[in-house]
Image (cartoon, rainbow, N blue to C red):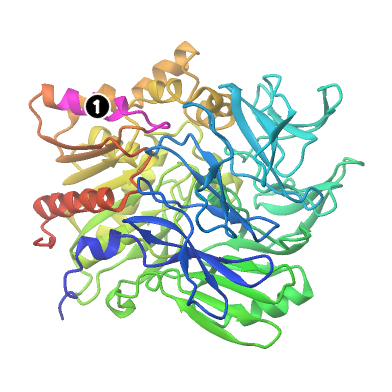
Amino acid sequence: MALPDILPVEALFDSPERAGATISPDGTRIAYLAPWKNRLNVWIRGVEDDSETRCVTADETRSVTDYHWTDDPRWLLYVQDAGGNEDWHLFRVDLDDPDAPAVDLTPYPPGVRTSIGQQRPDRPGRVLVQVNARELDRFDLVEIDISTGESTVLAENPGTVLDWLPGAENYARSLTENGDLELSRHDPATGELTPITTFTGDGHPMGINPFELDADGTGVWLGSYRDGDRAVLARFDLSTGEESEVDSHPELDLDGDRRIVVQQSSPLIRDRASGRLLGVRYLGERQEIRALDDEFGEVLAKLAALSDGDLAGISRDDAGRRWVVSFTHDRDPGATWFYDHATGESRLLFRPYPHLDPESLAPMTPVTIPARDGLPLPAYLTLPVGVEPRGLPLVLLVHGGPWYRDSWGYSPEVQLLANRGYAVLQVNFRGSTGYGKRHLEAAIGELAGAMHDDLIDAADWAVEQGYADPERLAISGGSYGGYAALVGVTFTPDKFAAAVDYVGISDLVNFTRTLPPFARRGLISNWYRYAGDPDVPEQRADMLARSPITRVDRIRTPLLVAQGANDARVVQAESDNIVAALRERGVDVEYLVKEDEGHGFLNPENQIELHRAIDRFLAEHLGGRCDPA
């Protein structure tokens, strides 16, 4: 037995050949992302004929990652920032005029951020956005005419509104002092807000997800615990104030929070033209979709038969006939299919990474690990292919958030590590979403406490099972995962042989105080509740005690730190300060800063450089293989 051939870093971290395909509302064209001048841009082709394939955006600086069809298939919308600063602008592309450049519909100065646009069936040709152009700490609601670019302010934020209900002009959401969510009705004539109801913030550190106006605008579909532990889909009637259950799973949580943290997407599958609810996504070890519409149930059965992966992107034309879907899979990521429900025809459109052989990649296996206090910790274990899984070097890969969760699917980082001979363990420690309110709220006050104990217990479990060598353990993660890596080398300095901190928090007080002004309003129900409020002296002291920067003198573990200079969430000082403190002590620390990146690296050359550095670093300190290039 032997490990597969070494995969070059570029094979895993360069741009996909194609990805993110969707079908136009009239069912005649397919849009997708593909490289142009080493950056992902939007391309289009015909459904039946790809002879007229062409690139319709031209960003040479930063990859386009998010685009949308409009109700008029002439126009495409996409968002872009500058160097990862997250000051998003909304651009329009005219597909009927190939020579016309993209038009910035939100030409605001630096520091202004625009939300991804929402369209309404009753307002064709227009898109609603939320933008903080008037005051940087608050978002107003603006409607933009897609064709002309003319914008109209529909509602000014008086300073109390957290955000406006997507797709609606007359409902606002605010947070109360104790973190509850207040829904109000906005009077466009007077600008006044009239409270409708208040939803408890318990179990909702990132807000209530989903929270969407229903198809006829008389109610809100929302994720609700309804006095239980599992999140179900409920409907709140805006007239009567009554909440009723729409759908639930006997064992699984609604897949809401995870999707909103990273993808800004919804667990609700809706008809694009009418907004009608078709299905709901739930997530356990794998995803389950429940169909709430008979016709969609028939389509769902046909789509599910196309792959043994989990349905990811789902796109359909307005007639409900033609579908373009992609699949999540641990070894064959993003396979994208076309399906015609009228004829039964289906065909594979593309695999994003056709050069990768699924048989040479490592499967991801769900496991459950008991924490020391008895809390079950759902996790995913990936073991290298071709070698006996005994006494391996192990990388504890910690997810961000912390209100996110790891799930089954492809990860280029996991596959890089497994290819090099490492076991990889991803733990959904307390505070991870998707496992019920009790699992989530067990993390309150437990940063660098029980949350870290969960990671240590998981590493010890891997050793006890014989998978891992206790002398060759590493901890690595980004954002909160970077914080966890720094906690690992400061609170348990003898546990790990190496650590990687990628855009991680080193000082909880500085982190919360340097977030953008508009983001601070939302801290009540998450960071203030779980970690502390730096304006309360005793809480500030506790936050500092749980911050790696105050224990930097305990670090003796080899450390690699990576940071984006334009990071708006975890500012560069979070990495600069810990690196400077270590170098002042004469401790060698590898530090990679990218001037054209933000909260995570996007451009492929930066991803490749980062993971080449991680490859070399772990090989040196854990003894795994390394790409000789």
Question: What secondary structure do most residues of the magenta stretch adopt?
Answer: helix
Q: Residue flagged by tag 1: what amino acid is it? A: Asp
Asked if residue 350 is positioned above or below residue 500 in the image, the reply reads below
Asked if residue 490 is positioned above or below residue 391 in the image, the reply reads above
Q: How many labels, in total? A: 1
Magenta stretch contains residue 53: no
Asked which quadrant contains residue 233, the reply is: bottom right
Q: Looking at the image, can residue 94 be seen?
A: yes
What residue does disc 1 label? 576
Q: Position of residue 9 (x, y in %)?
A: 21, 61
SS category of the residue bearing label 1: helix
Relative to the observer, which residue lies in front, 603 or 211?
603
In the image: residue 105, left or right of residue 510? right
Tell me where the magenta segment starts and ends, as one range.
567-582
Q: Looking at the image, can residue 464 be seen?
A: no
Asked which quadrant contains residue 211, the reply is: top right
Relative to the observer, which residue lies in front, 614 or 148?
148
Please identify the quadrant where the N terminus is shown.
Answer: bottom left
Please identify the quadrant where the C terminus is shown.
Answer: bottom left
In the image: residue 511, left or right of residue 211? left
Q: Position of residue 111 (x, y in %)?
A: 48, 26
Which residue sits furthest top? 537
Magenta stretch contains residue 575: yes
Relative to the observer, which residue lies in front, 17 or 486?
17
